[in-house]
Amino acid sequence: MMNSNGGMKTPWPAGELELEQVRNFNKKLAWLPRFRIRNRITPRVIQALLQSSQIGGAGKLRKHGLKAERKVIDVGGVSVPVRIIRPRGKAKGVVLDFHGGGWVIGNAQMNDSFNIAMVNICNVTVVSVDYRLASSTPIEGVMEDCQCAARWLLNDGCEESAGLPVIVVGESAGAHLAAATLLALRQSPGLLQRVSGALLYYGVYDLTGTASVRTAPRETLLLDGPGMVEAFRRLTPGLNDQQRREPPLSPLYGDFTGFPPALMFAGELDPLRDDTLELADRWMKSAPVEVHLLPSSPHGFIHFPTTMADTVLAYSHEWITARIDAVAH
């Protein structure tokens, strides 16, 4: 189904064997604790474990003939580290990547597996933003880091993206930061026009909680559905719900005039399902949007060892390549 601006909502094609595989994996997820952050100590512990698990990560890159460069950029006095992975040959485009992790855990390296695939399949350079985390920085500082990285990359003087199409990619909290960054760029229309597309996986776009968040049952997978509204409040102390709805903090309520085409994915069982569906409806009024609801899928599904996850990622790579080719020609 396509709207007058080229937006499209389509059910994701999945055979019974694929669905059975997803449902069987969901049974394993049901035994795991839900992701919930209720203090500042827990995310720091998780972050330390993540970093220790990444020791020797350069070997993964070397297997593909690639390497990563850590670069600290400075925009308006704000210093932001980025992780850059370049293709072996000349890049056809650049991907600006925002990692997930609930704003409180994660780093640019955690997306290496996904980014290596994008580099090799789409022939792009991937710039992943190592933004400060909300466990020690107000959310406004986290968003500022992402905006500064985008302004650096989209500036005419940036050698990394000179003359190349730029695609913005974000997952979960990273999708929130990607959308918020694009909204902030509306103040610089020349920079926003340089973005050729946005790929967003199951993001958070209303920090007061959409209907699917507020009615999430106790048995949600991966995420602690009933505790999410309180988690949003902890992320934004001192604000009331009216202030939390202000864009770009809650991208859902922003003005999408001048936005690029987008591809969005959400899981049918994700408490954040409505965030993506409602964002797509609003974004479609200004630019083409293709949005897919994945049957029987929880939050984080692209990380799971299922055929459906593989096909979603393959489709995403095709979409990135098509967007780059469309701009190039």
Image: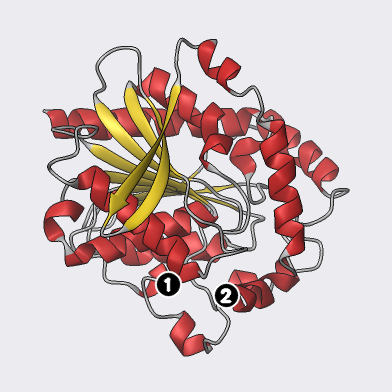
- Check the image and name the residue furthest to the front: 77
Residue 157 screen position, x and y as percent: 13, 41
Examine the rendered structure and indicate whether residue 294 appears above or below residue 252. above
- Which residue is farthest right? 31
In three-dimensional space, the C-alpha distance between marks 2 and 1, rounded to whole angstroms, equals 12 Å
Asked if labels 1 and 2 touch by Cβ distance under 8 angstroms, the answer is no
Could you tell me which residue is drawn at 31 percent across and 55 percent down?
Answer: 148
Pick the residue in front: 23 or 252: 252
Badge 1 marks a residue whose secondary structure is: loop
Badge 1 local density, few (<14 within 10 Å), some, or many (20+)?
many
Query: Label 2 sits on what residue type?
Result: Gly
Q: Decide if residue 17 is on the left or right side of residue 77.
A: right
Residue 7, visible in the rendered structure: no
Q: Is residue 262 above or below residue 40?
A: above
The amino acid at mark 1 is Leu
Q: Residues within 10 Å of mark 2 (few under 14, many from 20)?
A: many
Q: Residue 169: where, in percent of width, then height?
A: 40, 44
* Image vertical order of residue 173 relative to residue 206, above or below: above
Residue at image location 46% in from the left, 54% down from the top: 175
Label 2 SS? loop
Please provide percent x and percent y for residue 291.
42, 50
Identify which residue is drawn at 46% across, 10% down.
Answer: 65
Q: Nearer the viewer, residue 125 or 271?
A: 125
Which residue lies at the image location 84% right of the left edge and 54% below the top edge?
Answer: 33
Q: Image check: 237 left or right of 228?
A: left
Q: Which residue is mark 1?
A: 249
Nearer to the camera, 255 or 96: 96
Residue on which the image places disc 2: 209
Quarter of the image where one finds residue 133: bottom right
* Image-quadrant location for residue 279: bottom left
